[in-house]
Amino acid sequence: MELSGVGVWSGALRYGDRAERETAAAELEALGYSAIWVPGGAGGAVFDDCRVLLDATSRVAVATGILNLWMHDAAEVAADHVAVTADHPGRFLLGIGISHSLLVDAQEPGTYARPLATTRAYLDALDAAPTPVPVAERALAALGPKMLELARDRTRGAHPYLANPEHTRIAREALGDGPLLLPEQPVVLETDPEKARALGRKHFEIYLQLVNYTNNLRRLGFTDDDFADGGSDRLVDGIVVWGDEATIARRVQEHFDAGADHVCIQVVTGERGGVGTFPREQWRALAPALTQLAARG
């Protein structure tokens, strides 16, 4: 699978009203977005939810960002994957990730361990399934150097979340040429600094509790001072891009200039993961500026 251009990451497109998900997906395709990304963590019906979006569209790719490997049996995932791709060949990307100890252990205490080895074993299980998931049709949530190397060696590429163009540059160096680099970029279409940063801090609430993200933010030069009181202005401005359409487009282009093949934007609504809110006015407003962007060869 190849991905380019700009896509949309949205919790509402998985968990929202079905009729509105179908309508919104069709509109995103018509607006020129190249992919739809949905969270894959909670619940066991993620493939059914992706099928809703695929059935409602004809060209855009649909991707999980990400399927929590602790919550899904590899053999069942492989079987569901082959069924979806049989009906929609070349349009589904299986994004897989190790999730976070705080979230996993809240469900089953003591479960989360050895993230790199566990991810490698899960990829082994996908390869060993009766209907293996092809390397070209799976990607890995990856932030740190070892997980980026695993994404490079065992999947089509990496899907970094809550990163920035500097991380994209680092990730491209780790991946080398060839593997896809598919970062997520949170955006706030708001020019008032106080309002925009308030939404940015709301977005950060859960992530500042998750060590995978804070470790990566430290690698990018942020410190504990940036994590205090909901996040410093420097942290919010460094990760969440806010402003008008042109400002947001410049940040997305920075990802492409740093080596991204595809960027998926997440419009920050103030709700965790945007669940329940379809920011269709923002998607429409941003489309003319974003859908013309692409990686520079």
Image (spheres, rainbow, N blue to C red):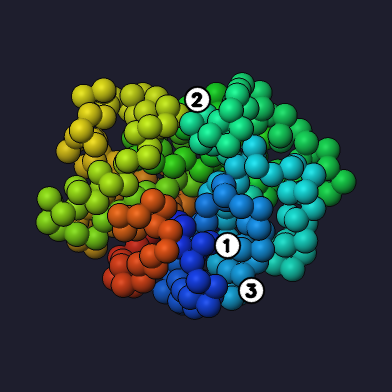
Query: In the rendered image, which residue does mark 3 sit on?
Result: 55
Q: Nearer the viewer, residue 22 or 8?
A: 22
Q: Earlier in the sequence, mark 2 or mark 1?
A: 1
Quarter of the image containing the N terminus? Answer: bottom right
Query: In the rendered image, which residue does mark 2 sit on?
Result: 145
Q: Earlier in the sequence, mark 2 or mark 3?
A: 3
Residue farthest to the right? 130
Badge 2: residue crowd in 10 Å (few <14, some 14–19, many ≥20): some
Q: Earlier in the sequence, mark 3 or mark 1?
A: 3
Q: Which mark is residue 10?
A: none
Residue drawn at the location 79% of the way across and 53% of the way down: 79
Query: In the rendered image, which residue does mark 1 sit on?
Result: 61
Q: Is residue 239 visible?
A: yes
Q: Is residue 216 visible?
A: no
Q: Nearer the viewer, residue 61 or 46?
A: 46
Q: Is residue 211 left or right of residue 110?
A: left
As helix, strand or loop, the secondary structure at mark 2 comes to helix
Badge 1: residue crowd in 10 Å (few <14, some 14–19, many ≥20): many
Query: In the rendered image of this protein, does residue 94 appear above or below residue 258?
Result: below
As helix, strand or loop, the secondary structure at mark 1 comes to strand
Alpha-carbon distance for marks 2 and 3? 37 Å
Residue 42 point in image, percent of width and height: 57, 49
Alpha-carbon distance for marks 2 and 1? 27 Å
Q: Are marks 2 and 1 in contact (CB under 8 Å)?
A: no
Residue drawn at the location 56% of the way across and 30% of the way down: 105
Residue 59 point in image, percent of width and height: 58, 71
Residue 275 point in image, percent of width and height: 43, 59
Q: Is residue 243 left or right of residue 257?
A: left
Residue 109 point in image, percent of width and height: 58, 28
Q: Is residue 112 left or right of residue 289?
A: right
Badge 3: residue crowd in 10 Å (few <14, some 14–19, many ≥20): few
* Residue type marked 1: Ala
